[in-house]
Amino acid sequence: MQVIIGVDIGTTGCRAAVYREDGVALANQSLEYPLYTPQAAWAEQDPDEIFQAVLTVTARAVQQAALPPKTIAGLCFSSVFHSFIPVDKDGAPLGRMLTWADSRSQSYTEELKRHHDAQAIYERTGCPLHPMYPLSKVLWLRHERPDLFRRAARFISIKEYILYRFLGKYVVDRSIASGTGLYNIHDRCWDGELMELLGLTEDQLSPVAATTSVEGPLLPAIADRLGISPATPVVLGAGDGVLSSVGSGAVLPGQLTAMIGTSGAVRVVTDKPAVDPKGRTWCYNLTDEYWVLGGAINNGGIAFRWARDKFAATEQFVAEKLSLDPYEILSRYAEQKPAGSDGLIMLPFFTGERAPYWNANARGVLFGLNLNHGKRHLIRATLEGICYRMYSIFTALEEVAGRAEEIRVSGSFTRSRLWVQIMADVFGRPISVPGEPEGSAFGAAILGMTALGILGNIKEVTKFINIKEQYLPNERHHERYQRLYAIYERIYWNLQKEFEEIARIQREWAEE
């Protein structure tokens, strides 16, 4: 029986998993890497640290599986969207990579909105104007770092960088390209009008190929490091978000996925590209036959981590001594407070926000505080606030794609039964938890199997997925959350000028 390696290059870490052609995992390895935030609005990573981590986890997974090289049918890549690396003519990065969370190009995004037809750009690219996209980052670099812009031979993503190091050539899959804000999803090519606007030439961006494109051979030194044959086929793969939908088995009409990890997203698979007349959702490529509509939030698990780090030092110390997960302790805290946190509402806009508001100036808000509220309320309000964020995308997506009959969830938040139940109560719908925990890596493996002819279509993933648990909504809790969500929405819209002003003040003071 053949195996395929699914490699997932995520926001804060990477994973490599080896799967048999019947979907059974034989090996699973992961590593984390740092995120550098030297100033407000900055979010950078070292491309070489990520490259070394990818090499390490893949080699370890191959070693763990302990299979002859001839049984490895191929490897397929999942990768974080919207990363941005200027490289020189030799392929060396000209600095750290800017991640999707880097929002220093916000002023140039606003300039694009003022002087160009933002809706027309969105309709062509499927990407609402926002500083997370490389479109805005190129403009920022051109004006704020002109010397570096002139030195750059190419502008690439982290996946392109790793593939360049693996294969010795530049190529980008259509999925990653569709998440740049520079790719025309209807004509399926780099958008000529935007290229001219940014002062880019065709040879400064990589050739685009299908997500199922099979490449090779591997450079001998890379193959030797991984412990596989240089002739092992390399399937380009897609973005991590769209492959998470595949990995959860939610590829049929009426199925929707909701993921909360560091960030969060709600997605649905369709058979054609589509955009929202109100500009709330994005549209990214999955394969030549399928597209994914959805929206992502900046502040998922990262907001829960903030609550842990700022308010639970004692709990972290106790957890370490007792070999417990501190998040488990905090979830128990939250469980001790009622749905709605006794009227405490959190807007968890710690790093600005993406869908459906696309507002990088948004900042976190705690509303309704009184003397009765304590740490346990704050923890629960954080979990609820993140679910409100997901619900705002969910309602927008149903307007665009139709009613969801099934919602499947993935990501680290599924380790907390309380958190998943809160989502069911906020959404007012049953929530299903698939048995396969590594969505994007498994999705990459399924896409690889499809590209290599082991599977006939990605929809065959459904035969590999079983539902481990289902959470039913508590109607009384749902009614409470509906009342609080209406207030939550009004708070956001009533603070637009204040968000803009405080974000400007924070940027100015950070530069002093």
Image (cartoon, helix red, strand yellow):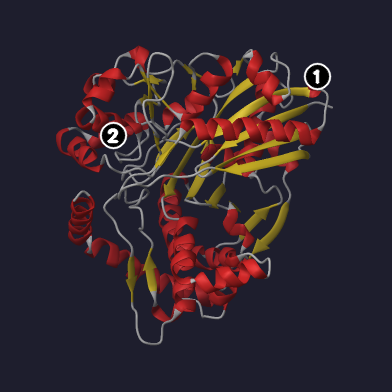
Q: Residue at x 53, y 52 (%)?
A: 261
Q: Would residue 251 be seen by someone viewing this image from the given angle?
A: no
Is residue 327 depicted above or below 6 in this figure? below
Specify the amino acid type for callout 2.
Ser
Q: Nearer the viewer, residue 131 or 129?
A: 131
Quarter of the image with the N terminus in it? top right
Q: Residue at x 20, y 54 (%)?
A: 509
Specify the amino acid type for callout 1.
Lys
- State the image quarter where residue 61 is shown: top right
Q: Nearer the viewer, residue 109 or 464?
A: 109
From the viewer's perspective, tell me whether residue 115 is left or right of residue 48.
Answer: left
Q: Residue at x 62, y 69 (%)?
A: 319
From the viewer's perspective, tell me whether residue 261 is left or right of residue 504.
Answer: right
Q: Secondary structure at mark 2?
A: helix
Q: Position of residue 208 (x, y in %)?
A: 46, 18
Q: Residues within 10 Å of mark 2 (few under 14, many from 20)?
A: many
- State the image quarter where residue 490 is shown: bottom left
Is residue 455 depicted above or below 128 in this figure? above
Q: Which residue carries the number 2 mark? A: 136
